[in-house]
Amino acid sequence: MARFPFSAIVGQDEMKQALLVAAVDPAIGGVMVFGDRGTGKSTAARALAGLLPPMTTVEDCRYHCKPDERGSCPDPCTSGRNRKAAVPFVDLPLGATEDRVLGALDLERALRAGEKAFEPGLLAKAHRGFLYIDEINLLEDHLVDLLLDVAASGENLVEREGLSVRHRAQFVLIGSGNPEEGELRPQLLDRFGLSVEVRTPEAIDQRVEIMRRCAAQEADPEGFAADWKAEDEKVLKQIARGQKKLATLTVPDEAMADMAGLCRAVGADGLRGELTLMRAARALAALKGARAVTREHMIAVAPMALRHRLRRDVLDETGSTVRIDRAIAELFG
Protein backbone atom coordinates (compact mmCIF):
# COMPACT_ATOMS: atom_id res chain seq x y z
CA MET A 1 0.00 0.00 0.00
CA ALA A 2 1.25 3.50 -0.86
CA ARG A 3 2.50 5.57 2.05
CA PHE A 4 0.29 8.30 3.47
CA PRO A 5 1.76 11.77 2.74
CA PHE A 6 3.38 13.32 5.81
CA SER A 7 1.78 16.70 5.17
CA ALA A 8 -1.68 15.15 4.97
CA ILE A 9 -1.66 13.89 8.56
CA VAL A 10 -4.28 15.84 10.50
CA GLY A 11 -3.27 17.33 13.87
CA GLN A 12 -0.68 15.57 16.07
CA ASP A 13 1.55 18.61 15.67
CA GLU A 14 3.89 17.77 18.55
CA MET A 15 4.55 14.26 17.20
CA LYS A 16 5.26 15.58 13.70
CA GLN A 17 7.57 18.27 15.06
CA ALA A 18 9.48 15.73 17.17
CA LEU A 19 10.00 13.49 14.11
CA LEU A 20 11.23 16.43 12.02
CA VAL A 21 13.64 17.52 14.78
CA ALA A 22 15.00 13.95 15.03
CA ALA A 23 15.38 13.80 11.24
CA VAL A 24 17.48 16.98 11.30
CA ASP A 25 19.71 15.70 14.11
CA PRO A 26 19.60 11.90 14.65
CA ALA A 27 22.09 12.33 17.53
CA ILE A 28 19.19 13.54 19.69
CA GLY A 29 18.50 9.89 20.49
CA GLY A 30 15.21 8.92 18.94
CA VAL A 31 11.55 9.57 19.65
CA MET A 32 9.21 7.76 22.03
CA VAL A 33 5.51 8.12 21.16
CA PHE A 34 2.96 7.10 23.77
CA GLY A 35 -0.71 7.26 22.94
CA ASP A 36 -4.00 5.66 22.07
CA ARG A 37 -4.28 3.03 19.36
CA GLY A 38 -5.10 4.29 15.88
CA THR A 39 -3.75 7.82 16.34
CA GLY A 40 -1.30 7.76 13.43
CA LYS A 41 1.92 6.89 15.29
CA SER A 42 3.32 4.42 12.77
CA THR A 43 1.70 6.27 9.85
CA ALA A 44 3.63 9.45 10.68
CA ALA A 45 6.94 7.62 11.09
CA ARG A 46 6.55 5.73 7.80
CA ALA A 47 5.43 8.89 6.03
CA LEU A 48 8.52 10.79 7.14
CA ALA A 49 10.87 7.98 6.08
CA GLY A 50 9.17 7.72 2.70
CA LEU A 51 9.36 11.46 2.24
CA LEU A 52 13.16 11.64 2.40
CA PRO A 53 15.13 11.56 -0.87
CA PRO A 54 16.97 8.36 -1.91
CA MET A 55 20.39 7.91 -0.37
CA THR A 56 23.57 7.01 -2.25
CA THR A 57 25.16 3.70 -1.25
CA VAL A 58 27.85 1.36 -2.53
CA GLU A 59 26.30 -1.15 -4.93
CA ASP A 60 25.47 -4.53 -3.34
CA CYS A 61 26.65 -3.45 0.12
CA ARG A 62 24.49 -5.01 2.85
CA TYR A 63 25.42 -2.23 5.29
CA HIS A 64 24.36 0.76 3.14
CA CYS A 65 27.90 2.17 3.13
CA LYS A 66 28.33 5.70 1.81
CA PRO A 67 30.67 5.98 -1.19
CA ASP A 68 33.38 7.61 0.96
CA GLU A 69 33.09 4.73 3.49
CA ARG A 70 33.69 2.04 0.85
CA GLY A 71 35.50 -0.98 2.29
CA SER A 72 35.04 -0.01 5.92
CA CYS A 73 32.27 -2.51 6.77
CA PRO A 74 32.53 -6.27 7.49
CA ASP A 75 31.77 -7.02 3.82
CA PRO A 76 34.45 -6.41 1.17
CA CYS A 77 32.23 -3.77 -0.47
CA THR A 78 34.83 -2.73 -3.01
CA SER A 79 32.44 -2.22 -5.91
CA GLY A 80 33.33 0.90 -7.85
CA ARG A 81 29.69 1.59 -8.61
CA ASN A 82 27.14 3.41 -6.50
CA ARG A 83 23.37 3.20 -6.49
CA LYS A 84 20.40 5.10 -5.16
CA ALA A 85 18.33 3.40 -2.46
CA ALA A 86 15.27 4.37 -0.45
CA VAL A 87 15.91 5.48 3.13
CA PRO A 88 15.46 2.29 5.20
CA PHE A 89 12.42 1.92 7.43
CA VAL A 90 12.76 -1.27 9.46
CA ASP A 91 10.06 -2.73 11.71
CA LEU A 92 11.33 -4.62 14.72
CA PRO A 93 8.76 -7.31 15.63
CA LEU A 94 8.07 -8.05 19.30
CA GLY A 95 9.14 -11.67 18.92
CA ALA A 96 12.56 -10.84 17.42
CA THR A 97 15.51 -12.70 18.93
CA GLU A 98 18.81 -11.10 19.85
CA ASP A 99 20.48 -12.81 16.86
CA ARG A 100 17.84 -11.37 14.52
CA VAL A 101 18.39 -7.87 15.88
CA LEU A 102 22.19 -7.77 16.21
CA GLY A 103 23.20 -10.30 13.56
CA ALA A 104 24.85 -13.71 13.95
CA LEU A 105 26.84 -16.46 12.29
CA ASP A 106 25.56 -17.34 8.81
CA LEU A 107 24.78 -21.01 9.46
CA GLU A 108 23.88 -21.83 5.86
CA ARG A 109 27.25 -20.61 4.61
CA ALA A 110 29.06 -22.31 7.49
CA LEU A 111 27.44 -25.67 6.70
CA ARG A 112 27.73 -25.37 2.92
CA ALA A 113 31.25 -23.96 2.56
CA GLY A 114 32.74 -24.38 6.03
CA GLU A 115 33.31 -20.61 6.27
CA LYS A 116 32.66 -18.33 9.21
CA ALA A 117 30.61 -15.41 7.93
CA PHE A 118 28.42 -12.81 9.53
CA GLU A 119 24.74 -12.46 8.67
CA PRO A 120 23.69 -8.83 9.33
CA GLY A 121 20.68 -8.23 11.55
CA LEU A 122 17.97 -5.60 11.67
CA LEU A 123 20.40 -2.97 13.00
CA ALA A 124 22.48 -3.21 9.82
CA LYS A 125 19.34 -2.97 7.67
CA ALA A 126 18.27 0.18 9.54
CA HIS A 127 21.64 1.98 9.12
CA ARG A 128 21.12 5.54 7.79
CA GLY A 129 17.37 5.17 8.21
CA PHE A 130 14.68 4.51 10.80
CA LEU A 131 14.16 1.63 13.22
CA TYR A 132 10.55 1.46 14.36
CA ILE A 133 9.37 -0.55 17.36
CA ASP A 134 5.63 -0.73 17.92
CA GLU A 135 4.49 -1.57 21.46
CA ILE A 136 8.04 -1.08 22.72
CA ASN A 137 6.78 -1.31 26.29
CA LEU A 138 6.14 -5.03 25.62
CA LEU A 139 9.64 -5.66 24.23
CA GLU A 140 12.08 -7.55 26.45
CA ASP A 141 14.13 -5.15 28.57
CA HIS A 142 17.52 -6.57 27.57
CA LEU A 143 16.71 -5.95 23.88
CA VAL A 144 15.64 -2.38 24.61
CA ASP A 145 18.93 -1.88 26.49
CA LEU A 146 20.91 -3.16 23.48
CA LEU A 147 18.98 -0.99 21.03
CA LEU A 148 19.44 2.17 23.06
CA ASP A 149 23.18 1.50 23.50
CA VAL A 150 23.64 1.06 19.76
CA ALA A 151 21.47 4.09 18.97
CA ALA A 152 23.63 6.20 21.28
CA SER A 153 27.03 4.93 20.05
CA GLY A 154 26.16 4.57 16.35
CA GLU A 155 27.97 1.20 16.24
CA ASN A 156 26.99 -2.42 16.66
CA LEU A 157 29.57 -4.82 18.12
CA VAL A 158 28.87 -8.55 17.90
CA GLU A 159 31.19 -11.06 19.57
CA ARG A 160 29.89 -14.62 19.51
CA GLU A 161 30.50 -18.03 17.92
CA GLY A 162 34.12 -17.08 17.24
CA LEU A 163 33.10 -13.91 15.37
CA SER A 164 34.07 -10.38 16.25
CA VAL A 165 32.25 -7.92 14.03
CA ARG A 166 31.81 -4.17 14.32
CA HIS A 167 29.71 -2.10 11.91
CA ARG A 168 28.04 1.27 11.74
CA ALA A 169 24.42 1.39 12.90
CA GLN A 170 23.26 4.99 12.83
CA PHE A 171 19.50 5.32 12.74
CA VAL A 172 16.60 7.26 14.19
CA LEU A 173 15.00 5.02 16.80
CA ILE A 174 11.23 5.46 17.05
CA GLY A 175 9.26 3.61 19.70
CA SER A 176 5.54 3.67 20.20
CA GLY A 177 3.25 2.18 22.79
CA ASN A 178 -0.07 2.32 24.56
CA PRO A 179 0.30 3.20 28.29
CA GLU A 180 -2.65 0.90 29.08
CA GLU A 181 -0.51 -2.09 28.07
CA GLY A 182 2.31 -1.31 30.48
CA GLU A 183 4.86 1.43 31.07
CA LEU A 184 8.43 1.50 29.87
CA ARG A 185 10.98 1.39 32.67
CA PRO A 186 11.99 4.98 33.63
CA GLN A 187 15.69 4.14 33.19
CA LEU A 188 15.03 3.10 29.60
CA LEU A 189 12.54 5.85 28.83
CA ASP A 190 15.15 8.41 29.94
CA ARG A 191 17.51 7.15 27.24
CA PHE A 192 15.15 8.29 24.48
CA GLY A 193 15.87 11.81 23.31
CA LEU A 194 12.28 12.99 22.90
CA SER A 195 8.97 11.78 24.25
CA VAL A 196 5.57 12.81 22.91
CA GLU A 197 2.02 11.99 23.91
CA VAL A 198 -0.73 11.63 21.33
CA ARG A 199 -4.44 11.50 22.00
CA THR A 200 -7.52 10.71 19.95
CA PRO A 201 -8.77 14.03 18.51
CA GLU A 202 -11.85 15.40 20.29
CA ALA A 203 -12.91 17.97 17.68
CA ILE A 204 -15.58 16.68 15.30
CA ASP A 205 -14.20 18.61 12.33
CA GLN A 206 -10.76 17.00 12.81
CA ARG A 207 -12.25 13.52 13.01
CA VAL A 208 -14.30 14.14 9.88
CA GLU A 209 -11.25 15.47 8.01
CA ILE A 210 -9.24 12.37 8.98
CA MET A 211 -11.98 10.10 7.59
CA ARG A 212 -12.20 12.19 4.43
CA ARG A 213 -8.45 12.04 3.75
CA CYS A 214 -8.18 8.32 4.53
CA ALA A 215 -11.07 7.59 2.16
CA ALA A 216 -9.45 9.69 -0.57
CA GLN A 217 -6.13 7.92 -0.15
CA GLU A 218 -7.73 4.46 -0.28
CA ALA A 219 -9.76 5.35 -3.39
CA ASP A 220 -6.84 6.82 -5.37
CA PRO A 221 -3.43 6.51 -3.68
CA GLU A 222 -1.48 8.02 -6.58
CA GLY A 223 -3.86 10.94 -7.04
CA PHE A 224 -3.91 11.65 -3.30
CA ALA A 225 -0.09 11.59 -3.17
CA ALA A 226 0.02 13.97 -6.15
CA ASP A 227 -2.34 16.38 -4.37
CA TRP A 228 0.05 16.58 -1.40
CA LYS A 229 3.32 16.38 -3.32
CA ALA A 230 3.98 20.11 -3.21
CA GLU A 231 3.45 20.28 0.57
CA ASP A 232 5.68 17.25 1.15
CA GLU A 233 8.40 18.82 -1.00
CA LYS A 234 8.29 21.92 1.23
CA VAL A 235 8.87 19.71 4.27
CA LEU A 236 11.70 17.91 2.49
CA LYS A 237 13.43 21.21 1.64
CA GLN A 238 12.98 22.34 5.24
CA ILE A 239 14.69 19.18 6.53
CA ALA A 240 17.55 19.47 4.02
CA ARG A 241 18.08 23.12 4.92
CA GLY A 242 18.01 22.28 8.62
CA GLN A 243 20.58 19.49 8.25
CA LYS A 244 22.90 21.81 6.34
CA LYS A 245 22.52 24.66 8.81
CA LEU A 246 22.84 22.56 11.96
CA ALA A 247 26.66 22.39 11.97
CA THR A 248 27.07 26.18 11.94
CA LEU A 249 24.29 27.07 14.39
CA THR A 250 25.45 28.41 17.75
CA VAL A 251 23.79 28.13 21.15
CA PRO A 252 24.40 31.35 23.14
CA ASP A 253 25.44 31.11 26.79
CA GLU A 254 22.24 32.84 27.90
CA ALA A 255 20.17 30.14 26.14
CA MET A 256 22.20 27.43 27.89
CA ALA A 257 21.59 29.17 31.20
CA ASP A 258 17.85 29.16 30.48
CA MET A 259 18.00 25.42 29.74
CA ALA A 260 19.94 24.61 32.90
CA GLY A 261 17.58 26.76 34.98
CA LEU A 262 14.50 25.04 33.57
CA CYS A 263 15.92 21.55 34.14
CA ARG A 264 16.77 22.43 37.73
CA ALA A 265 13.32 23.96 38.30
CA VAL A 266 11.43 20.87 37.12
CA GLY A 267 13.78 18.43 38.88
CA ALA A 268 15.05 16.60 35.81
CA ASP A 269 17.30 13.64 36.69
CA GLY A 270 20.95 13.90 35.65
CA LEU A 271 22.31 16.13 32.91
CA ARG A 272 20.83 14.26 29.96
CA GLY A 273 17.89 16.66 30.05
CA GLU A 274 20.06 19.73 29.43
CA LEU A 275 21.99 18.06 26.65
CA THR A 276 18.88 16.82 24.86
CA LEU A 277 17.15 20.15 25.34
CA MET A 278 20.13 21.92 23.78
CA ARG A 279 20.30 19.55 20.80
CA ALA A 280 16.55 19.64 20.21
CA ALA A 281 16.38 23.44 20.44
CA ARG A 282 19.32 23.71 18.03
CA ALA A 283 17.68 21.28 15.58
CA LEU A 284 14.39 23.19 15.75
CA ALA A 285 16.19 26.49 15.17
CA ALA A 286 17.94 24.95 12.14
CA LEU A 287 14.60 23.62 10.89
CA LYS A 288 13.13 27.13 11.18
CA GLY A 289 16.12 28.72 9.44
CA ALA A 290 17.10 30.79 12.50
CA ARG A 291 20.56 32.31 12.96
CA ALA A 292 20.91 31.25 16.60
CA VAL A 293 19.03 29.31 19.24
CA THR A 294 16.65 31.47 21.27
CA ARG A 295 14.53 31.01 24.38
CA GLU A 296 11.47 30.51 22.14
CA HIS A 297 13.07 27.48 20.49
CA MET A 298 13.91 26.03 23.90
CA ILE A 299 10.37 26.55 25.21
CA ALA A 300 8.90 24.91 22.10
CA VAL A 301 10.83 21.65 22.59
CA ALA A 302 11.00 21.61 26.40
CA PRO A 303 7.95 19.35 27.00
CA MET A 304 9.10 16.67 24.54
CA ALA A 305 12.70 16.78 25.82
CA LEU A 306 11.92 16.75 29.54
CA ARG A 307 8.52 15.21 30.33
CA HIS A 308 9.95 11.69 30.61
CA ARG A 309 12.87 12.74 32.83
CA LEU A 310 11.04 14.22 35.82
CA ARG A 311 11.24 12.70 39.27
CA ARG A 312 7.92 11.59 40.67
CA ASP A 313 6.73 14.00 43.36
CA VAL A 314 4.31 12.44 45.87
CA LEU A 315 3.18 15.94 46.89
CA ASP A 316 2.44 16.98 43.31
CA GLU A 317 0.29 14.62 41.28
CA THR A 318 -0.03 16.95 38.28
CA GLY A 319 1.26 15.59 34.97
CA SER A 320 4.79 16.18 33.71
CA THR A 321 3.68 18.52 30.93
CA VAL A 322 1.75 20.70 33.40
CA ARG A 323 4.79 20.89 35.69
CA ILE A 324 7.02 21.95 32.78
CA ASP A 325 4.54 24.59 31.57
CA ARG A 326 4.23 25.92 35.11
CA ALA A 327 8.02 26.14 35.52
CA ILE A 328 8.34 27.96 32.17
CA ALA A 329 5.69 30.49 33.25
CA GLU A 330 7.42 31.08 36.60
CA LEU A 331 10.92 31.42 35.13
CA PHE A 332 10.24 33.28 31.90
CA GLY A 333 6.78 34.80 32.26
Image: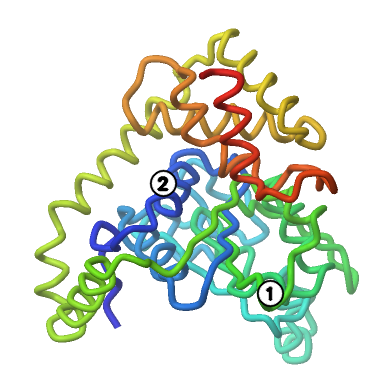
Which circle marks residue 119 in the picture? Answer: 1
- Using the image as rendered, state which of residue 219 and residue 3 is in the foreground: 219
To which quarter of the image does residue 160 belong?
Answer: bottom right
Which of labels 1 and 2 is toward the front?
2
Can see residue 118? no
Label 2 sits on residue: 17
User: How far separated are the C-alphas under marks 1 and 2?
Assistant: 36 Å
Eyeballing the image, is 201 above or below 12? below
Residue toward you, 104 or 46: 46
Q: Residue at x 44, y 40 (%)?
A: 24
Q: Residue type at mark 2: give it.
A: Gln
Identify which residue is drawn at 49% across, 19% down. 295
Q: Position of residue 332 (x, y in %)?
A: 54, 18
User: Can you see residue 166?
Assistant: yes
Quarter of the image holding residue 106? bottom right
Mark 1 closeness class: few <14, some 14–19, many ≥20 residues within 10 Å: some
Q: Nearer the viewer, residue 48 or 199?
A: 199
For marks 1 and 2, the one nearer the N-term is 2
- Mark 2: which secondary structure? helix
- Dot 1: what SS? strand
